[in-house]
Image (spheres, grey):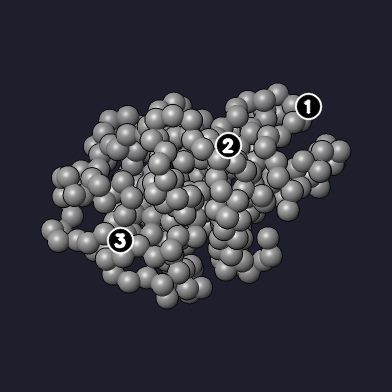
Amino acid sequence: MSSLERAVLPFELFKRGKVRDVFRIGDRLLIVSSDRISAFDYVLPSLIPGKGRILNRIAAFWFERTRDIVPNHVISAEPETMPEFRGHAAVLEKRALLARRLDAFPVEAIVRGYIVGSGWNAYQKDGAICGVPLPAGLRFADPLPEPIFTPTTKAEKGHDENITFAQLADRLGGETAGRIRDLSLRLFAAAGAYALERGIIIADSKFEFGRDEKGEIVVIDEIFTPDSSRFWKRDEYRPGHEPPPFDKQYVRNHLLASSWDRASAPPPLPAEVIGATAAKYGEIFRILTGQQP
């Protein structure tokens, strides 16, 4: 697996995100997934070999699988096979999506089925997450009575902030906010059921949405990847304890256990963490898609 730090292509660079390089080609976007990895709002100085291909292919898998629930922005999951891009196949192969350029909503739609991460911190403080009250006595990594919708702002810089559904409705309008909530919960339920059949728990996941030229709400960016979701093996789950993660949380846990202060430039990842992260991404890809990385 070769590594890609950033895509160099003869197209207009629209945006360079933490992980993806996005090029504008008329009313389309060419989205190239690099091997960069981010944590705690920093792009880490280490690459995870093959990570970009895993992210792109697993997102493409889920976009195709869920298109009956909500339309998505994908034009082609293999743009390297299109005549206009064949000359750039070495950069694009298995890493790129060609997508419609849509008006994105400036929020992240998060669904939580278990109480971990920032949701656990909010629950300990307020007994609620994003204004959703929860039963007393929940333990870390416990399942919630039912999945909950917990939106956040989407900050270009700095931290995303939790908001309530009422605040989301104020930003987007009640009808749009309700539609995003309902679609998020439906996506989470469908993917969760599929994953559980394969022995995987999806503990939480985030989505992004946009609106197309017809006014229809469309899911964009990525869905159910190891960068946007928390995956656990069902056989390793024990109530009250977080199982070994098969997603970016593995890297977060390493950084939390290190001496890094999360206020300065992050340190390189050790070779064993890089290798283990690449292996975990590859394993969850194989389990969920039945394909080889």
Residue 191 in sight from this viewpoint: yes
Please name which of the two marks, 2 or 1, marks the residue nearer to the observer: 2
Residue 149 in sight from this viewpoint: no
Amino acid type, mark 2: Pro
Check whether the beta carbons of the residues at disc 2 and disc 3 lie within 8 A of each other.
Answer: no
Q: Position of residue 162 (x, y in %)?
A: 30, 38
- The residue identified by callout 1 is 10
- Distance (Cα) linking label 1 and label 3: 46 Å
Amino acid type, mark 1: Pro
- The residue identified by callout 2 is 45
Q: Position of residue 250 (x, y in %)?
A: 47, 54
Based on the displayed image, in which of its 4 quarters is residue 280 positioned?
bottom right
Secondary structure beneath dot 1 equals loop
Secondary structure beneath dot 2 equals strand
Q: Which of the two labelled residues, at mark 2 and mark 1, occupies the earlier sequence position?
A: 1
User: Which numbered circle lies on residue 284?
Assistant: none
Q: Residue furthest front?
A: 259
